Amino acid sequence: MKQTEYIQYDGVELAALVRAKEVSAQELVQASIAQQTKVNGPLNAIVHHRHEQALEEAKSIQGQSPLSGVPFVLKDISQSIKGARLTSGSTLFKEHIATEEANYTRTLRKAGFVFTGFTNTPEFALKNITEPRLHGPTRNPWCHTRSSGGSSGGAASAVASGIVPIAGASDGGGSIRIPASFTGLVGLKPSRGKTPVGPSVGRNWQGAAIDFVLTRTVRDAAASLDILQTIQPDAAFQSPLYEQGYLHTLRREPTKTMKFAYTLTSPVGTPVSETAKEAVRQAVQFIEKEGHIAEEVEWPIDGEALMRHYYAMNCGEMSHLFHQLERQAGHAITLDHVEIESWMLAEAGKFITAREYVESLHAWDDAARHMSRLHDTYTYFMTPTTADTAPRIGELTLDASRIAELQEDMLRAETNDKRQDAIYEMFLPSLTYTPFTQLANLTGQPAISLPVASDEEGMPIGIQLMAMKGNDHLLLRAASYVEQTDLWKGFRNNPYFQHD
């Protein structure tokens, strides 16, 4: 199969070709490797490859599942293969070899995906850009001076450049939806507990984080969720199986008037670009033209307070990780070993009390109740996915003087409030770009970014839809409905998919 043919198909189409024996899984892997060889140099999407293993594994693919035989890249954090390198984007783990296969990876392997490599991620998946000290920045296929977002930035660039139609991703605060918005992709964060965790942990970031995929089409997202949805008895959170199948539900047209709540404002009071606002306005016009209802509403939560409770979890998680690593290494972890954001979070986490941590989790639950009440009236809550199109490479990276200032603020802070102020200020430039996505992680709701708009330079931007927890099928159904209309921009204007 020629590369120009390969990149025009989505995963469902490629798997159908394998089942029909019109192409072999090995041929698909060869096409994926050829595309990676051609485009990965400037993009830096793939940081470890396993081409030889993938070609060998492809020989045994029979093509029985809806995505069997499709080339796939895993994210270089948590999505482990036993015996393969897994760095988590950190110099601390630059030589780390995984000792177990993640349940997520095992599930995809059983479904017939063929793993060709691992994608770049910021250190410990903590940022909304992918510019780790270890591997360097991942660039946006739409414009190489722009970021592809984070933390699944490598995955987004791999899909948006045609290396693979579907890539492993994870989302703990928008890390699937943000890159989707910046690169013109479909980015679904499923309901809490919907996909596998472990085997060595039973929850990720107290339920805020979840492993899933990035795709170019809605049906690839639906087919992937059919494969990954699970009831895992040893996991902390469960979500009921959708027995009808997510791919099947896309065939159903809306049978009644849909009700959308929407907002054009940031939940933390930061600026929102006209491009982002116009993306929502155009969607509202489309919704009303189609005979559905869209009503502007106020945010039902205190966004800044909730973000502080989100960062409290980040602090606790990083402090726990550093404690484990220091015990193993026999020495303290310093800024020589990790980046400033990781160090600051871990340092602040040393001082958070059990009471404060529980208060933060209760605040998450309060937000979930507020959103549940909103969804008693509205099926969907719509926002911009991001406050603007993709930032330039380096735009959100802290310079040396700012790092020194933040380090001093942290060391001199005498109260937890002061430490949390420093954390909030450190992340504020990034949060200003992406204030809309974290809510769904804390409430456990499904949320999806859809590529429906672009700015004057042609850079994509998405809108975000959220639904009641467990209503992933309604999100996918609405997304599929939009995908078939003129509102949908998708990836076809992406320069990597243009041919003379």
Image (tube, rainbow, N blue to C red):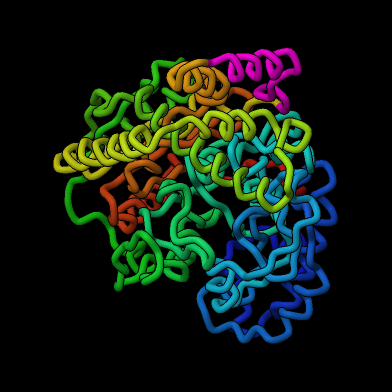
**Residue closest to the eye, 360 or 469:** 360
Residue in view at x 78 percent, y 33 percent: 336
Q: Position of residue 411 (x, y in %)?
A: 61, 19
Note whether 254 is above or below 321 in the view shown. Answer: below
Tell me which segment is drawn in magenta: 393-413
The answer to whether residue 149 of the structure is visible from this angle is: yes
Q: Position of residue 437 (x, y in %)?
A: 43, 36
Q: Magenta region, mostly helix, strand or loop? A: helix
Q: Position of residue 494 (x, y in %)?
A: 66, 42
Give yes or no for residue 419 being in the magenta stretch: no
**Residue closest to the eye, 499 or 249:** 249
The answer to whether residue 451 of the structure is visible from this angle is: no
Residue in view at x 67 percent, y 41 percent: 123
Quick one: quadrant of the N terminus?
bottom right
Residue in view at x 37 percent, y 41 percent: 442
Position of 426 with respect to 23 (left or right) is: left
Q: Position of residue 211 (x, y in %)?
A: 51, 56
Note whether 28 is above or below 284 in the view shown. Answer: below
Position of 442 with respect to 404 (left or right) is: left
Residue in view at x 40 percent, y 64 percent: 235
